[in-house]
Image (tube, rainbow, N blue to C red):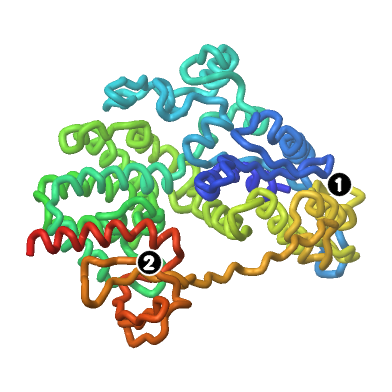
Amino acid sequence: MLKAFFDALFCVTLPKLIGSHVIQVNFVTILSTDDDTTAVGHGKPNVFEWISDILKELLDLKLNGIVVNIPDSSGHVSPIHFEIIFLGIVGDLPALAMMLNFKGHNGYYACFFCLTRGVYDTKVLYPFTRPLVERSSDDFKRFALEGSPQNDCFGHYGMSVISELYDHDLPSAIMIDYLHTSLLRQTKTIITHLRELLSISEIERLDTLLKHQSFPHTFNRRLPSFLNLAYVKGSELRNLLLYAMIPRLIDFFDIELVSFLCLFVCGVRLLHGSPVVAVDRCIRQQLSSQLFDDYQRNVSQYFNKIHTLTCHLHDHYPKIYEDFGSLSSTSTFPFEDFIGYLGDGHYGSRNIAEQLIFYYSIDFFVNNAVDDRQDSFIDPDSYEMIDIVNVDKHDKRIILHHDSVLIIPYIMATGGTERSRRAAKPPAIYTPDDSFLCVMDAQNPTDYTCIHNSIIAKSSGKRVLVKDGNTMSEKIIIARGIMSVISRELPNYRLAVDLEHTFA
């Protein structure tokens, strides 16, 4: 059930998969609800209606917990009650803004954690500000109560759909995803600005070095190209940022610029994962805070208009690290992998939404089918498990739903269809018609005529003997084809010959 909640939650990124297809579906929502229906939507859903049923189940899970039967060494089974605590919510900025009922990343009060106001300069920028005025949990709730869809209150459009799950834990329960914020936005923007400082030959030489950069076999991605950043992967940018950026750029840029980039690289590395040597957790947090502070203070001196919300959010990384641990453990890399896996479940360019649901439903059903075993740890009498997959009903739901909306899987599953077979048309075979010829008199080059091939007595290559009554004349073939084409082209041949004799 929790998996289904997060699966539905992160399907908001599916426009990347199908947004450009000819069917013009720019948004797909996959959601299984209590009434055994599956929804496919065009456009962003109403988030309150979208996950309201699942939220009821999550709230019930939070209030009642679960009961697990755990056997001891003697085989006696004892029921133990476990409480469920929701740690936090993570996602890219558009997804977080939708779930929190918050202003988008291009707004003036778009930061979830502080009250820094953006400044418009062709786009909304968040200049370096100290001290930061943090949003408290009371502020977050009060602003949400005062905000409305027509008039926000410091970025809040109203209460969040998930506010009851976290009580007074917002905004401290919000986790910034470094995959989208640091890699796909900030790092990619830095590379774009650096590329403008290099010539084409220098970029090609740098790309050659990056392409042949050696990594251990555990690295599944190569380094991205500076020339083409359109289809760059987050894992490629991660390898570049954490391992190869500074060593490779030091030969192409001024040492002062490379030293400034070290502030950002080292700040992220301190919070990314386990260090090579033992470094105290508090020291890592303090060092990264100082590095990000210096980076934010001086970034406008090196790059123009780069200080957007994604850049500003790095000020809050140390606090997120203190509450939730390393950035690598709170990223959306696993969810992006799931989206990629889900996006592979379609063939062709038609019925994409239905195909995604069909194949995902089959996988979900097969992997979550539970047999009735007596030695299960879960006590169904003590607690009714919330399971959106009902083995008896789900199989019928798949067949009934997809028989009506997706013809191809139906044919594959049943071997038949109610639709009549289309009449097959035989392929059109092109047969050229050379029955008419445009010929020139061999003795008089200015004499052109159009003849039918039936009056040809003898032919040798382009020379033919034409029988005209009782006389025979030698002609030279100029063109072959049907009468309409020959008649249309004949004046052109005569004009060309007239010009040839005029200038001869």
Give the image quarter of residue 123: top left
Which picture quadrant has residue 320?
top left
Q: Is residue 486 above or below residue 263?
A: below
Q: Where is residue 419 in the image (x, y as percent from the top left)?
A: 81, 56
**Disc 1 + disc 2, Cβ < 8 Å:** no
Which residue sits at x=22%, y=66%?
446
Q: State the mark number for residue 383.
A: 1
Which residue is tagged 2? 450
State the SS at label 1.
loop
Indicate the amino acid at tag 1: Tyr
Q: Residue 342 carries which label?
A: none
Instruction: Give left or right: position of 129 versus 424.
Output: left
Q: Name the front one of labels 1 and 2.
A: 2
Q: In this view, does 299 lie above or below 250?
A: above
Q: Which residue is drawn at 30% across and 57% down?
A: 491
The answer to whether residue 297 shows anywhere in this view is: yes
Q: Is residue 80 visible?
A: no
Residue 244 screen position, x and y as percent: 26, 60
Instruction: Name the foreground residue: 29 vs 493.
Output: 493
- From the top left corner, tell me how far across and down residue 43 is, in percent: 60, 34
Q: Which quadrant of the structure image shows residue 186?
A: top left
User: What crowding class fits label 2: few (fewer than 14 Cα within 10 Å), some (14-19), or many (20 or more)?
Assistant: some
Label 1: few (<14), some (14–19) or many (≥20) C-alpha neighbours in 10 Å: some
> Residue 251 appears at what percent x and percent y?
11, 58
Between 426 and 377, the one nearer to me in the picture: 426
